[in-house]
Image (spheres, rainbow, N blue to C red):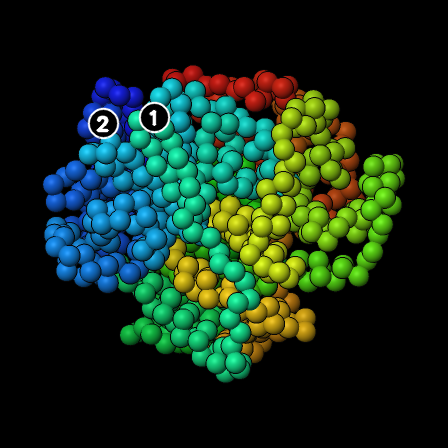
Amino acid sequence: MCGIAGVIGRTGEQVDASEVHRMCQTIVHRGPDDEGIYVRGPVGLGMRRLSIIDLSGGHQPIHNEDKSIWIVYNGEIYNFPELRKELEARGHQFYTHSDTEIIVHLYEEMGADCVRKLRGMFGIALYDERKQSLLLARDRIGKKPLHYALSGGRLYFGSEIKTILAVAPELAEISLEGLLQYFYFGYIPDPLTAFQQIHKLPPGHLLEYSKGQLNVRQYWDVPAYSTAAPRSEEECLEELETRLTEAVRIRLISDVPLGALLSGGVDSSIVVGLMSKVSAGPVKTFSIGFRNADFNEADYARLVAQKFGTDHHEMIVDPNIGETLEMLSHMMEEPFGDSSMIPTYYVSKLARQHVTVALSGDGGDELYAGYDRYVVNLNRNRYRVPSWMGQVYRNHVYPMLPQTVRGRKFAWNISLPPRDRYLDGVSFLPALHRERSLFSDDLLEQARQFANPFCRFEQYFESAPAKDQLSRLLYLDTKTYLTADIMAKVDRMSMATSLEMRAPILDHEFVEWSASLPMEWKYRNGTRKYILKKLAERIGVPSELLHRRKQGFSLPLVHWMRDQLKDGLLSILTEPRTLQRGYFKPNAVRALLDEHYRGYRDRAGAIWLLLVFELWHRNFLEARGIEYDARVPEVATATASAESAL
């Protein structure tokens, strides 16, 4: 596991190795073991390495036989032994035992489409000297991040945004469109970032850059849903177990200690159970819990550990949220509102004390309909509200109702069509819709120049390769929430502790097979993740786990915000420094906090978004000398001096 960075300069330019070194220095946490740089003419490639495979010989950048192709790469290719044999049979010569080198030789055979042969997670930067072209590629699900920016005739790229800002601080122009997405969803979906000229390469896409021309294209997508019906439950279970066991087995390849995160939920318990089945010795497992019983799953994790005889490590976390958020918001290049990043960070930190690689159970909810919101959306189909009546309510009645009126937002939701009910349900602070009263008039005026933040989500729903509504929602979440929230969280928090995370349920071959299953195997008679739970029973996961209320990896925010955070960290939301930025109406912010403190309604999620947003401003933007005017119209043209940003 590594972090990568680089720059392709203008024709005739000589890139300085020190420039690439500065980029790499911003991501030492991703690769504390080694640094490698390749510079020649206008090309500079760099990487930071966390050694996992071929500890002594896998130093990057890596090249082909005649040194005409060079690569830096972040990830793991699990089918590299098979690919190496095929390439050696075709005459290719290898000088390392790493998985990185097979990509170079595959490129010689297939060009950019070589990524189609890779089974794993990756962010790739490959330079072809003969063609004078750069290939950037990101894995199918987006487990590994990759950012890029084309400016002034130069292409910059890196695993994290800060690599680009380290050498091009003038690109720190805040994107109001990206911030709107954050307010809506708590994260910024691909390809947007918090900065206007910096983009995320979407999952399943590759970028080719040559002679100043940039081309981004898709090489993979989730295939059609519900295309292959098993003849029986036993047949379905047999194939499910075989395929998932294989996905687990190939992720046990490592030259360093390896373990698993164990939350006490169905998905991570299945992964641990299958690991125990194919491992030679006890699996190392790691869990955290909280003192608040409503949010503590440590007891369930302990049951699984006992069942499968793991070498279990557990920690009860009573975090200082203020200190933790201060630390993490220094690292966060974008505002990120998923509060489960904190337990993810702590369990990664615990695991890293014992192992370098850990498997997780991520992906089961998006593939097998595990979230409560799917059930809520289906249940609300029974409401039939005429379109004209819904518009009257949203445009005229809703704005007049006091915030404290119960059912106000529920009525907004059911006044929408089924698809839009779901989008409304997964949004927090939709500035152009039901939460417009929170935002300043200046911001709303600026925001109207951009496309509706729901637009891309609507397109995913409408273009989903599925006929039934629930499959369309699974596809939508796979393209948005899974990649830009879950995978971003797991990558950032694990890499903050220099831990490599692997997700066997998100093996792309397993994803494709799972998509092909008819919905009855995923959601049946109100039971979510139906066939996964049957597999859990089959391999011996304790029954206490399988039929309890889903908790998720969450924090007791509602309690903390009415107790220890109220007079501490949350007070910054009403400081003049915060309110004068121009994003929000000061009285609306105070009313939001008061509504939560008095217990009228749980607004913890919205308050958390505001808090993280302000800390991002203070600890990432201001700490790097990124200047901006408090008036929103000027926010979109923020600049930074080179001296202060570096």
Q: Residue at x 69, y 51 (%)?
A: 419
Placement of 511 over or under 453, stated as above or below: below
Look at the image and tell me whether residue 646 can be seen: no
Q: Say whether residue 115 is left or right of residue 132.
A: right
- Label ID, residue 17: 2
Mark 2 residue type: Ala
Q: Residue at x 55, y 66 (%)?
A: 226
- Label ID, residue 169: none
> In the image, residue 364 lies at what x, y percent?
52, 63
> In the image, residue 147 lies at what x, y percent?
41, 36
Mark 1 residue type: Gly
Q: In the rendered structure, are the residues bearing label 2 and label 1 in contact, judged by CB atoms less than 8 Å apart?
A: no
Q: Say whether residue 214 is left or right of residue 92.
A: right
Q: Residue at x 68, y 74 (%)?
A: 525
> In the image, residue 555 lies at what x, y percent?
59, 53
Secondary element at image label 2: helix
Residue identified by numbered label 1: 212
Q: Say whether residue 361 is left or right of residue 375.
A: left
Task: Determine crowd level at label 1: few under 14, some 14-19, many 20+ residues with C-alpha closer than 10 A.
Answer: some
